[in-house]
Image (cartoon, rainbow, N blue to C red):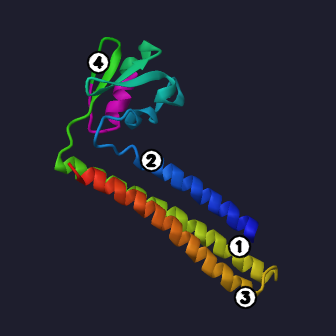
Amino acid sequence: MQMYFNKICKEIDNFVILFNKKISKFCVKRINTSFVADIYVNYYGKNIKLSSISKINVEDNSIKISLFDITFLSKLEKQISLMKLDFIIFRKKNNLLIKVPPLTQERRNRMLLLLKKELEYAKIFIRNKRQDLNKKKIYFVKEKLISLDEKKLWDKEIQKIISIYISKIEKLFSSKEKEILNK
């Protein structure tokens, strides 16, 4: 049981790191290239990360995308505009520039809604892992690999660790929420 427990904890640890990385893209103080770097685009029939087919940087309060293959520029422009990211997209020479509009209260509220969805997905993931642990624990009791006393100890341990992980993601959410709401 301990080995399975450690495996699940490692999975949740990795998920918390991923959650933190995901919500760090909700940036309000400066323009962040991560808005577009992790977008997958259809590049001649294959889904490829935009960052692997272009150079992305911040220039003049815009995100500048310099494609390695400029023949793909118009297709990329169309794909990004279909994503409805609330950005202003225009061409400048052989580059795409994405202008991020200033943060209004309405945009902050929409960003907060997206952030709350991410928090809920994270909580669901963690609860599902608790469910996996509980199923394994029941299996171990049925197979008489652990006693009922050990089961009770595992119940407490599982709940304690799940509460810690949920608390971690709520703290990450809370700090990002404050960042978004502060002007």
Q: Give me the C-alpha separation between circle 3 and circle 1.
A: 16 Å
Which structural element holds mark 4?
strand
Q: Quadrant of residue 5?
A: bottom right
Q: What separation in Å lies between label 1 and label 2 (alpha carbons)?
A: 30 Å
Say what secondary structure mark 3 lies in.
helix
Q: Residue at x 64, y 58 (%)?
A: 10
Q: In the rendered structure, which amino acid carries the disc numbered 2?
A: Lys
In the displayed structure, does residue 169 sit left or right of residue 32?
right
Q: Is residue 116 visible?
A: no
User: Earlier along the polypeptide chain: callout 2 or callout 4?
Assistant: 2
Mark 4 belongs to which amino acid? Arg
Magenta extent? 75-89
> Could you give the CA–CA distance between mark 3 and mark 4, rounded to whole angstroms?
67 Å
Q: Residues within 10 Å of mark 3 (few under 14, many from 20)?
A: few
Three-letter residue code for mark 3: Asp
**Residue at horizontal 21%, vertical 36%?**
101
Tag 4 residue? 91
